[in-house]
Image (cartoon, rainbow, N blue to C red):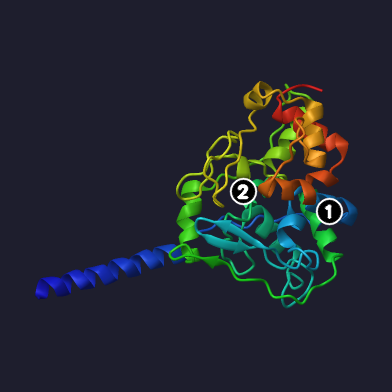
Amino acid sequence: MKRLYVLAVLTVLSVCVAVLALIFWQLPAEQSVPELKGDAKRGAYLARLSGCVTCHTAPGEQPMSGGSALKSKFGNFYAPNITPDTQHGIGSWTFQQFARAVRQGVSPDGESYYPAFPFEFYASLTDRDLADIWEALQAVPAAAEPSTPNAVNFPFNIRLGLKPWRSLFERSYTYREDPSRSKAWNQGRYLVMGPAHCAACHSPRNLAGGLAPGGDLSGDPSMQDGGVSPSISWWDLQEGGWTKAGLVSALRTGVLPDGDTLGGSMAEVVHGGTSFLLTKHLEDIATYLLDIED
Protein backbone atom coordinates (compact mmCIF):
# COMPACT_ATOMS: atom_id res chain seq x y z
CA MET A 1 0.00 0.00 0.00
CA LYS A 2 2.80 2.36 0.91
CA ARG A 3 4.54 1.58 -2.37
CA LEU A 4 1.39 2.46 -4.33
CA TYR A 5 1.06 5.71 -2.41
CA VAL A 6 4.65 6.68 -3.22
CA LEU A 7 4.10 5.78 -6.86
CA ALA A 8 0.96 7.94 -6.99
CA VAL A 9 2.77 10.90 -5.42
CA LEU A 10 5.67 10.56 -7.85
CA THR A 11 3.22 10.40 -10.76
CA VAL A 12 1.44 13.56 -9.63
CA LEU A 13 4.75 15.33 -9.13
CA SER A 14 5.94 14.28 -12.58
CA VAL A 15 2.77 15.60 -14.18
CA CYS A 16 3.09 18.91 -12.31
CA VAL A 17 6.71 19.29 -13.36
CA ALA A 18 5.79 18.55 -16.99
CA VAL A 19 2.96 21.10 -16.97
CA LEU A 20 5.18 23.76 -15.40
CA ALA A 21 7.87 23.04 -17.99
CA LEU A 22 5.34 23.58 -20.77
CA ILE A 23 4.01 26.78 -19.22
CA PHE A 24 7.48 28.31 -19.01
CA TRP A 25 8.68 26.89 -22.35
CA GLN A 26 9.73 29.89 -24.40
CA LEU A 27 8.11 30.74 -27.72
CA PRO A 28 10.09 32.75 -30.31
CA ALA A 29 11.11 36.15 -29.00
CA GLU A 30 9.09 39.06 -30.37
CA GLN A 31 10.63 40.79 -33.37
CA SER A 32 10.13 44.52 -33.76
CA VAL A 33 8.86 45.46 -37.23
CA PRO A 34 9.18 48.98 -38.70
CA GLU A 35 5.88 50.87 -38.81
CA LEU A 36 5.81 51.41 -42.57
CA LYS A 37 2.98 53.09 -44.47
CA GLY A 38 1.16 50.25 -46.19
CA ASP A 39 -0.28 50.07 -49.69
CA ALA A 40 -3.77 48.59 -49.42
CA LYS A 41 -3.97 47.69 -53.13
CA ARG A 42 -0.72 45.73 -53.03
CA GLY A 43 -1.80 44.21 -49.71
CA ALA A 44 -5.08 42.98 -51.20
CA TYR A 45 -3.10 41.29 -53.96
CA LEU A 46 -0.79 39.67 -51.39
CA ALA A 47 -3.82 38.51 -49.41
CA ARG A 48 -4.99 36.66 -52.53
CA LEU A 49 -1.53 35.29 -53.22
CA SER A 50 -1.05 34.15 -49.62
CA GLY A 51 -4.40 32.37 -49.36
CA CYS A 52 -5.84 34.77 -46.78
CA VAL A 53 -9.05 35.31 -48.74
CA THR A 54 -9.54 31.62 -49.52
CA CYS A 55 -8.97 30.38 -45.96
CA HIS A 56 -10.61 33.18 -43.99
CA THR A 57 -13.81 33.45 -46.05
CA ALA A 58 -16.49 30.77 -45.89
CA PRO A 59 -18.74 30.41 -48.97
CA GLY A 60 -21.47 33.04 -48.99
CA GLU A 61 -20.07 34.92 -46.00
CA GLN A 62 -18.45 38.34 -45.65
CA PRO A 63 -14.82 38.53 -46.78
CA MET A 64 -12.32 37.61 -44.05
CA SER A 65 -15.09 36.90 -41.50
CA GLY A 66 -13.97 33.31 -40.89
CA GLY A 67 -13.38 30.21 -42.93
CA SER A 68 -14.80 26.76 -43.46
CA ALA A 69 -13.39 23.70 -41.75
CA LEU A 70 -9.85 22.68 -42.62
CA LYS A 71 -10.09 18.97 -41.94
CA SER A 72 -7.13 17.02 -40.62
CA LYS A 73 -6.23 13.85 -38.76
CA PHE A 74 -6.07 15.91 -35.58
CA GLY A 75 -9.53 17.45 -35.95
CA ASN A 76 -11.05 20.45 -37.72
CA PHE A 77 -9.41 23.86 -37.79
CA TYR A 78 -11.31 27.05 -38.60
CA ALA A 79 -9.62 30.22 -39.86
CA PRO A 80 -10.81 33.07 -37.61
CA ASN A 81 -12.46 36.39 -38.36
CA ILE A 82 -9.69 38.84 -39.37
CA THR A 83 -11.86 41.83 -40.23
CA PRO A 84 -11.39 45.11 -38.26
CA ASP A 85 -14.27 44.24 -35.92
CA THR A 86 -13.00 45.04 -32.42
CA GLN A 87 -14.90 42.25 -30.66
CA HIS A 88 -14.78 39.32 -33.06
CA GLY A 89 -11.99 40.30 -35.44
CA ILE A 90 -8.58 41.93 -35.14
CA GLY A 91 -9.75 45.52 -34.76
CA SER A 92 -8.16 45.81 -31.33
CA TRP A 93 -4.77 44.48 -32.49
CA THR A 94 -1.69 46.59 -33.03
CA PHE A 95 0.44 46.24 -36.13
CA GLN A 96 3.21 44.67 -34.03
CA GLN A 97 0.79 42.04 -32.74
CA PHE A 98 -0.35 41.34 -36.29
CA ALA A 99 3.24 41.01 -37.52
CA ARG A 100 4.11 38.56 -34.74
CA ALA A 101 0.99 36.51 -35.40
CA VAL A 102 1.65 36.23 -39.12
CA ARG A 103 5.41 35.81 -39.18
CA GLN A 104 5.96 34.00 -35.87
CA GLY A 105 2.67 32.23 -35.22
CA VAL A 106 2.11 33.77 -31.77
CA SER A 107 -1.20 35.36 -30.79
CA PRO A 108 -1.55 38.69 -28.90
CA ASP A 109 -2.31 36.56 -25.82
CA GLY A 110 1.07 34.87 -26.14
CA GLU A 111 -0.30 31.52 -27.32
CA SER A 112 1.04 29.58 -30.27
CA TYR A 113 -1.14 29.12 -33.32
CA TYR A 114 -1.59 25.66 -34.74
CA PRO A 115 0.57 25.07 -37.83
CA ALA A 116 -2.63 24.71 -39.84
CA PHE A 117 -1.97 28.44 -40.08
CA PRO A 118 1.13 28.45 -42.33
CA PHE A 119 3.25 30.86 -40.28
CA GLU A 120 6.29 28.74 -41.11
CA PHE A 121 6.07 30.05 -44.68
CA TYR A 122 4.89 33.55 -43.80
CA ALA A 123 8.15 33.97 -41.89
CA SER A 124 9.61 34.99 -45.26
CA LEU A 125 7.22 37.94 -45.70
CA THR A 126 9.09 41.23 -45.83
CA ASP A 127 8.35 44.20 -43.58
CA ARG A 128 6.71 45.90 -46.55
CA ASP A 129 4.57 42.83 -47.26
CA LEU A 130 3.28 42.85 -43.69
CA ALA A 131 2.55 46.59 -43.76
CA ASP A 132 0.64 46.26 -47.04
CA ILE A 133 -1.46 43.29 -45.91
CA TRP A 134 -2.23 45.09 -42.64
CA GLU A 135 -3.38 48.17 -44.56
CA ALA A 136 -5.58 46.03 -46.81
CA LEU A 137 -7.23 44.32 -43.84
CA GLN A 138 -8.05 47.69 -42.30
CA ALA A 139 -10.05 48.47 -45.44
CA VAL A 140 -12.18 45.30 -45.19
CA PRO A 141 -15.70 45.93 -43.81
CA ALA A 142 -15.90 44.87 -40.15
CA ALA A 143 -17.95 41.72 -39.61
CA ALA A 144 -19.54 41.07 -36.20
CA GLU A 145 -19.23 37.35 -36.74
CA PRO A 146 -17.72 35.19 -33.98
CA SER A 147 -14.93 32.91 -35.07
CA THR A 148 -15.74 29.21 -35.04
CA PRO A 149 -13.69 27.43 -32.35
CA ASN A 150 -11.35 24.70 -33.52
CA ALA A 151 -12.68 21.18 -33.03
CA VAL A 152 -9.41 19.41 -32.29
CA ASN A 153 -9.20 15.98 -30.70
CA PHE A 154 -7.58 15.32 -27.31
CA PRO A 155 -4.68 15.67 -26.56
CA PHE A 156 -4.01 17.96 -29.53
CA ASN A 157 -6.51 20.51 -28.19
CA ILE A 158 -4.01 21.34 -25.40
CA ARG A 159 -2.13 24.29 -26.88
CA LEU A 160 0.76 23.95 -24.42
CA GLY A 161 1.80 20.92 -26.43
CA LEU A 162 2.56 23.18 -29.39
CA LYS A 163 5.63 24.53 -27.61
CA PRO A 164 7.72 21.35 -27.75
CA TRP A 165 6.20 20.59 -31.17
CA ARG A 166 7.64 23.83 -32.50
CA SER A 167 11.04 23.11 -30.99
CA LEU A 168 11.10 19.70 -32.68
CA PHE A 169 9.31 20.20 -35.98
CA GLU A 170 8.95 23.87 -36.91
CA ARG A 171 10.52 24.71 -40.27
CA SER A 172 10.54 28.47 -40.84
CA TYR A 173 11.33 29.32 -44.44
CA THR A 174 13.32 32.50 -44.93
CA TYR A 175 14.11 33.91 -48.34
CA ARG A 176 17.70 34.15 -49.48
CA GLU A 177 18.46 35.22 -53.02
CA ASP A 178 20.67 32.96 -55.10
CA PRO A 179 22.90 35.32 -57.10
CA SER A 180 23.74 32.56 -59.56
CA ARG A 181 20.11 32.31 -60.71
CA SER A 182 17.88 34.68 -62.64
CA LYS A 183 15.62 37.32 -61.14
CA ALA A 184 12.56 35.35 -62.27
CA TRP A 185 13.82 32.12 -60.66
CA ASN A 186 14.53 33.89 -57.37
CA GLN A 187 11.16 35.64 -57.39
CA GLY A 188 9.48 32.32 -58.11
CA ARG A 189 11.29 30.69 -55.21
CA TYR A 190 10.16 33.48 -52.89
CA LEU A 191 6.54 33.05 -53.96
CA VAL A 192 6.49 29.24 -53.88
CA MET A 193 8.35 28.75 -50.61
CA GLY A 194 6.99 31.92 -48.98
CA PRO A 195 3.55 33.50 -49.23
CA ALA A 196 2.03 30.98 -51.67
CA HIS A 197 3.20 28.20 -49.27
CA CYS A 198 3.01 25.46 -51.90
CA ALA A 199 5.08 23.12 -49.72
CA ALA A 200 2.39 23.21 -47.04
CA CYS A 201 0.41 20.72 -49.14
CA HIS A 202 3.03 19.39 -51.58
CA SER A 203 5.55 18.29 -48.97
CA PRO A 204 5.31 15.09 -46.92
CA ARG A 205 4.59 15.35 -43.21
CA ASN A 206 5.52 13.07 -40.35
CA LEU A 207 3.08 11.49 -37.88
CA ALA A 208 3.20 14.64 -35.75
CA GLY A 209 2.27 16.84 -38.72
CA GLY A 210 5.76 18.26 -39.11
CA LEU A 211 7.01 19.18 -42.57
CA ALA A 212 9.93 17.51 -44.25
CA PRO A 213 13.10 19.62 -44.01
CA GLY A 214 14.81 21.30 -46.93
CA GLY A 215 11.86 22.63 -48.91
CA ASP A 216 10.82 19.22 -50.21
CA LEU A 217 8.13 19.47 -52.91
CA SER A 218 7.88 15.73 -53.57
CA GLY A 219 4.18 15.53 -52.71
CA ASP A 220 2.29 14.04 -49.79
CA PRO A 221 0.75 10.57 -50.21
CA SER A 222 -1.15 10.96 -46.93
CA MET A 223 -2.42 14.50 -46.53
CA GLN A 224 -4.03 15.66 -43.31
CA ASP A 225 -7.47 15.71 -44.95
CA GLY A 226 -7.03 12.17 -46.28
CA GLY A 227 -6.18 13.27 -49.82
CA VAL A 228 -3.04 12.91 -51.91
CA SER A 229 -0.94 15.74 -53.30
CA PRO A 230 1.33 15.10 -56.30
CA SER A 231 5.01 15.90 -56.51
CA ILE A 232 5.77 19.32 -57.97
CA SER A 233 9.54 18.89 -57.85
CA TRP A 234 11.25 20.08 -61.02
CA TRP A 235 12.35 16.60 -62.07
CA ASP A 236 8.85 15.14 -61.76
CA LEU A 237 7.25 18.12 -63.51
CA GLN A 238 9.73 17.94 -66.38
CA GLU A 239 9.41 14.18 -66.61
CA GLY A 240 5.64 14.62 -66.73
CA GLY A 241 5.99 16.84 -69.79
CA TRP A 242 5.07 20.10 -68.11
CA THR A 243 6.07 23.30 -69.86
CA LYS A 244 6.20 26.83 -68.57
CA ALA A 245 3.17 27.82 -70.66
CA GLY A 246 1.22 24.76 -69.54
CA LEU A 247 1.92 25.38 -65.86
CA VAL A 248 0.97 29.05 -66.12
CA SER A 249 -2.27 28.12 -67.86
CA ALA A 250 -3.15 25.48 -65.24
CA LEU A 251 -2.57 27.91 -62.38
CA ARG A 252 -4.63 30.55 -64.19
CA THR A 253 -7.59 28.41 -65.28
CA GLY A 254 -7.44 25.14 -63.36
CA VAL A 255 -7.39 23.26 -66.67
CA LEU A 256 -4.59 20.76 -67.29
CA PRO A 257 -2.79 20.42 -70.64
CA ASP A 258 -4.70 17.18 -71.35
CA GLY A 259 -8.04 18.92 -70.84
CA ASP A 260 -8.69 17.51 -67.36
CA THR A 261 -9.24 19.90 -64.46
CA LEU A 262 -7.64 20.36 -61.08
CA GLY A 263 -9.83 19.16 -58.23
CA GLY A 264 -9.99 19.07 -54.46
CA SER A 265 -8.18 21.72 -52.46
CA MET A 266 -6.10 22.73 -55.49
CA ALA A 267 -9.26 23.83 -57.27
CA GLU A 268 -9.92 26.17 -54.34
CA VAL A 269 -6.36 27.49 -54.54
CA VAL A 270 -6.84 28.34 -58.21
CA HIS A 271 -10.34 29.77 -57.79
CA GLY A 272 -9.50 31.97 -54.81
CA GLY A 273 -5.81 32.61 -55.37
CA THR A 274 -3.67 31.86 -58.41
CA SER A 275 -6.34 32.83 -60.96
CA PHE A 276 -5.96 36.42 -59.70
CA LEU A 277 -2.18 36.57 -60.03
CA LEU A 278 -0.29 38.63 -62.56
CA THR A 279 0.99 36.62 -65.51
CA LYS A 280 4.51 37.71 -64.62
CA HIS A 281 4.22 36.15 -61.18
CA LEU A 282 2.75 32.93 -62.57
CA GLU A 283 5.67 32.79 -64.98
CA ASP A 284 8.10 33.31 -62.09
CA ILE A 285 6.47 30.45 -60.18
CA ALA A 286 6.69 28.19 -63.24
CA THR A 287 10.32 29.18 -63.78
CA TYR A 288 11.23 28.13 -60.26
CA LEU A 289 9.14 24.95 -60.18
CA LEU A 290 10.55 23.76 -63.51
CA ASP A 291 14.04 24.93 -62.51
CA ILE A 292 14.59 26.81 -65.76
CA GLU A 293 15.75 30.26 -66.69
CA ASP A 294 13.61 32.91 -68.38
Q: Secondary structure at mark 1?
A: helix
Residue topped by disc 1: 43
Image side of residue 127 versus residue 199, left or right: right
Residue topped by disc 2: 120
Residue ID at (84%, 53%): 43
Q: Residue 183: tell me if it is visible.
A: no
Above or below — where is 46 with respect to 3?
A: above
At label 2, the amino acid type is: Glu
Q: Residue 137: tell me if it is visible.
A: yes
Which quarter of the image is occupied by the N terminus?
bottom left
Tell me the distance, in whole angstroms, between the alpha carbons under discs 1 and 2: 19 Å
Q: Position of residue 3 (x, y in %)?
A: 11, 71
At label 1, the amino acid type is: Gly
Q: Secondary structure at mark 2?
A: helix
Above or below — where is 221 with respect to 93?
A: above
Residue ID at (34%, 70%): 16
